[in-house]
Amino acid sequence: MLFNITHTTKYQYNAPVSYGHNIATLRPRKSKGQELLDYTIEISPEPAEISERIDFFGNYITRFSIQTEHEVLKVTTKSQIKREYAQFQEGFFSDACKSVTMKSALESLQSTNLDILDAKQYILESIFIKKMDAGIHEYARKSFQSNRSVFDAAFELMQRIYTDFDFVSGFTSISTPIREVMEEKKGVCQDFAQIAIACIRSVGLPAKYISGYIETLPPPGEEKLVGADASHAWFSIFIPGFGWVDFDPTNNQIPRDQHIVVGWGRDYYDVPPLKGVVYGSGQSKLKVAVDIARIE
Amino acid sequence: MPITKTSWLNSYSTFQGYDEMYTSQNTVRPYWQKLLTGFDRLGVDGLMGRQKDIDWLLSENGVTYNVYNDPKGMHRPWNLNVVPFLLHQDEWKTVETGLKQRAELLNLVLKDVYGERTLIKNGIVPHEVIYGHRGFLRQCSGIEYTTRKFLSIYAADLARGTDGRLWVVNDRTEAPSGMGYALENRSTTSRILPEMYTEMNVTRLSGFFQELNQTLVEASPIKKENPNIVILTPGSHNETYFEHAYLSSFLGYPLVQGNDLVVRDGFLWMKSLQGLKQIDVVLRRVDDAFSDPLELREDSHLGVAGLLDVVRRKNVSIINPIGSGVMENPGLIPFMPNIAKYFLNQDLILPQIASWWCGQKKEKQYVLENLSKLVIKRIDRTNRESIHFGEFLNPEELDALKRNIEQRPYRFVAQERISFSTAPNFIKDSLEPRNLVTRAFCIASQNDYSIMPGGLVRVAPGRETIRVSNQRGGTSKDFWILEDQPINEAKIGLWQKRPSIAASGLEDLPSLTAENLYWAGRYVGRTLVNARFIRMVMRQLSMIQNPNEEPNSEKLKTLLKTTTHLMGTYPGFAEKAEKGPQAMENPYKEILSVIKDKDRVGSLAHTIGMFSNSYYTIRNLWSSDMWRVFEDIQKLWKSFQDEEQPSMNRILKVLNQLITRLIAFMGLVEESIMIQQGLLLYFIGLQLEQSMLTIVKCRSLLTIKYDAHTEYDLLEYLLISNESLNIYRYSYRSYIQLEDVLNLVALDLDYPRSLAYMLNRLQKDIARLPQSNHNNHLNSYQKFVFEAFAKLSLAEAATLSQTGTEDHFVRESLDTLMEELSDLLHQTSQSITSTYFNHTDKQNQLFTQSFPI
């Protein structure tokens, strides 16, 4: 499936900003079943310098500096993506995947082969997913049991989060601790992804955070609105002997072609779409618009 | 009576383990014997005298350290014991080789973990030891450096273990501290014990610091003869700020804070008075995570946004590189022997403390079973709060610790609890054994590491204390490496200071330093003027009536109101208080408050506090005389602050002392700091402040016309508070009258305390600022002062003395003039600030976006 994705981020400052340095994780990386065919980034005002590099996790990081005084910062990226991920769906439900139990997974993780070694870093605590409290572990243990299939457990965990948690935007921010989300059972997609990751790590398995987009389909018979699509986040669990499997607890499904990967890391901290330090005295107002257009 | 050498050791009981002074046969080692013989010549009293000299010298030089989270912990005096720690060259040579090996190993590990990570891939080091360490900064992965070594500076804490060898206890790699203190200890001890220092052939430190300088110069990404080097400090509240300032003046490189630096066009720049100056090398004393709020800790205001990317582009070198904190990692200790094999195919030369990393099953089991005998540390927190001594924990604490270890075993390391060697410390009047730890320093030099021949020795405070740390109130020692041959002074050579940007003029003054000097001038001026004024007010009050009662004369009321206007302590005497008793009803109480209440903005105590802060931040520019007088002021004020209800006479006495010391201090500032170092900014601040306060006084005391008697007294008050009464009498030899007073205090061009003189001087001083007279145009602050000076020059005392009409009681032209001058000077200050100290742009994080789904 081919998509044209336009992602616009606009910061409006209430006082002029004299200069600023920014980092963006906006260029979609190549990932399983996904290819980037075309990509442009447009920044206004024109940055004095801009560069791109690949980070520790293999994501594209764009860094730019704006040195002219401005009141509005606008970053627009246009990506053309070829996404053929639905084809793997059957594989996840295959024996090769489903037969891996917690017990055997934990044993396999003792190995030091390079794939396992790479995956194991996603068991350790990370910036936003720090000390696990008993609540998380308890919640996780209901699904993850020694003789049970890891895939089944993860699937159930996704379902439980979808059922137990309410999607409430504005209730949490990126600085809301996991514990609070767990207690309140409210949040947005990034909270749900991070709760799941915390649960999986608490039982000793690797899980990572995926940042991307999701295409929303209009109700039957209605026209799709431009800008109705959105940034999105979900999680991925490592099943030793099989590989990484993605789950979207916000929508209670295993991603297919409507999910588009931008980057991944240990948690949100590793892949913020846009961050920066600006010099000025005011506050800013943020507007984000994402539009995903199918090219049949 | 001379004391025999044995008497030093009569009460010296080496109750535990190894003592540095003794051989295994229990005889005193020859070089310690030599030192004791030297002490014999001094006798107990003599040695006590030398210890006193040391204490005095350190306090003279203002050698201090700070303790975090302790309100009384700022600027504690540094302690140095008169007995040095001795080590013979032969033993030191082995240690040196061992240190070089370890520095090189850590260098290779650092390079590997931020590069190929073969140690992890090949199973030499478990991944958790690196990935689970909060000092492993993934942002730094893959950065290439232009310096010869990744690790340019390495410090190791050494202590003598039970086998009689020196062991490595801790590795310091992030921003090792202590070098400056070691140097200061050396310079003090060598002055206090000159006989022994010469006799005993002590290896000199100067060569090491020359190499340090060379290392910094060569670190420049673009090879130049004189790269621009700065020392980045977190500021005057940091524990070792003294050392930052000390190294800055010793090496001759500017001391800067994050705010002084900025990233533009992919380079690092220092904001100086002239403008931006490109920086090549940063000697960093800010922690890794705080160095760049863009990529690292977002809440940091100690670093420079974008710094890491400048490093990535190889446009600046940071010493040590950001990310090197991951090597401060006791989790590495158990793997060091294999690392040495892997990289160098060698055995470790220096022994290490037996350590068990809990990330391994067997080791964890052993630790959990033997917890009460071990010392438990986090792999990534080596500060004392995170170290648990198993033997001191009660059963509940042990259980809690066990649970913590079980939860995340990879974060913990347990170490054997060993008793280190002791060495003699001079306490009161005798020698006593104390545990000690030595910090040794290594720097990357030509293809190898160079080791400081000596180091910083820290001594436990009490007999029973095992924890040795300056933060716990221990003391320190000089560290002498002894050679058999006399030291050849000629070979040492002179310390050749290269011309550096610190010495090259006002243009390159960091703007934060400039700003601090400017405010130092303003606050010292404000303190002096206010202290003099209050002194005069109190004298009048105590002469005329009971100071606890409301004054009945207009002149006293006017005087008290002026106090409030001058100090800005409203409502005070000048305005009606909204609730509670009016200040006028009990002048003593209000005056006491504006003197002593340090939380009240504008009070004398508050101003003195601001004055002290601004001076601490320019610590590197001080002379030792300045420090002494400054300390005197602090002591005087501190003891006064603690007094409750001081008498009028007591207050007057303190004010007199304060004023005398302030004047001494101001005199010293003028002769100790050079104009190029920023004294000009100090003068500008001082003149501006004094001018502004003179204006307030004139306006408040003179613009209202009173009856002749009151007028006379007010004029006299003005002259007294300006210290101008004698000059007035000398110049005018007449009854005090307004016109003459205005001529003297406001209009006289030759009298240094007159407003006209001060504005004229201000005008000349600001003309010397780097951005003045640009393209033959006056800068805006020049225009303001020019206008003020012109207005004042055109004024005539006779006109200013007139009221509108005979029955009018406001001197309107005087009032108008003073108001205009006041406005112009405020604009001057604003314009200077925005031109030169442009910190008004606050660093803000963009709000990170929240997800709509």
Image (spheres, rainbow, N blue to C red):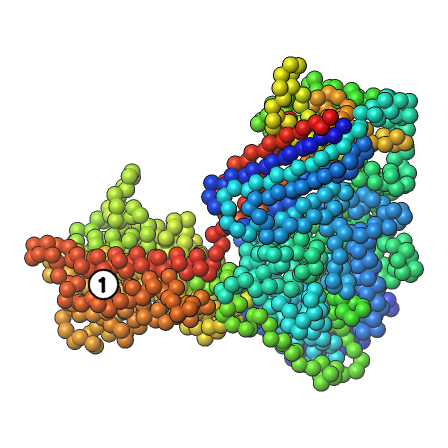
Tally of numbered discs:
1
Q: What residue appears at the point 67 percent right and 53 percent down from the top-left corner? A: B309
Q: What residue appears at the point 17 percent right and 56 percent down from the top-left corner? A: B812
Q: Position of residue A210 (x, y in %)?
A: 73, 33
Q: Position of residue B346 (x, y in %)?
A: 91, 61
* Residue located farthest toward the top when viewing the structure as drawn: A221
* Residue located farthest toward the front when viewing the structure as drawn: A296
The quarter in which the N terminus of chain B is drawn is bottom right
B149 vs A205: above or below = below
Residue B459 in view, yes or no: no
Q: What residue appears at the point 80 percent right and 40 percent down from the top-left corner? A: A121
Q: What residue appears at the point 55 percent right and 42 percent down from the top-left corner? A: A73
Q: Amino acid at mark 1?
A: Tyr
Q: Secondary structure at mark 1?
A: helix
- Residue B24 is left or right of residue B713, and the answer is right
B819 vs B224: above or below = above
* Residue located farthest toward the left when viewing the structure as drawn: B806
B207 vs B413: above or below = below
Judge by depth and name the residue closer to the eye, B611 or B145. B145
Q: Position of residue B227 (x, y in %)?
A: 64, 69
Residue B679 in view, yes or no: yes
- Residue B3 is left or right of residue B561, and the answer is right
The quarter in which the C terminus of chain B is drawn is top right
Would you identify the image quadrant in which residue B703 lies?
A: bottom left
Would you identify the image quadrant in which residue A6 lies?
A: top right
Q: Which class describes the residues within 10 Å of circle 1: few (<14), some (14-19), or many (20+)?
A: many
Task: Quickly name the residue at label 1.
Answer: B717
B654 vs A247: above or below = below
Q: Position of residue B152 (x, y in %)?
A: 74, 63
- Residue B782 is left or right of residue A161, and the answer is left
Judge by depth and name the residue closer to the eye, B561 or B136. B136
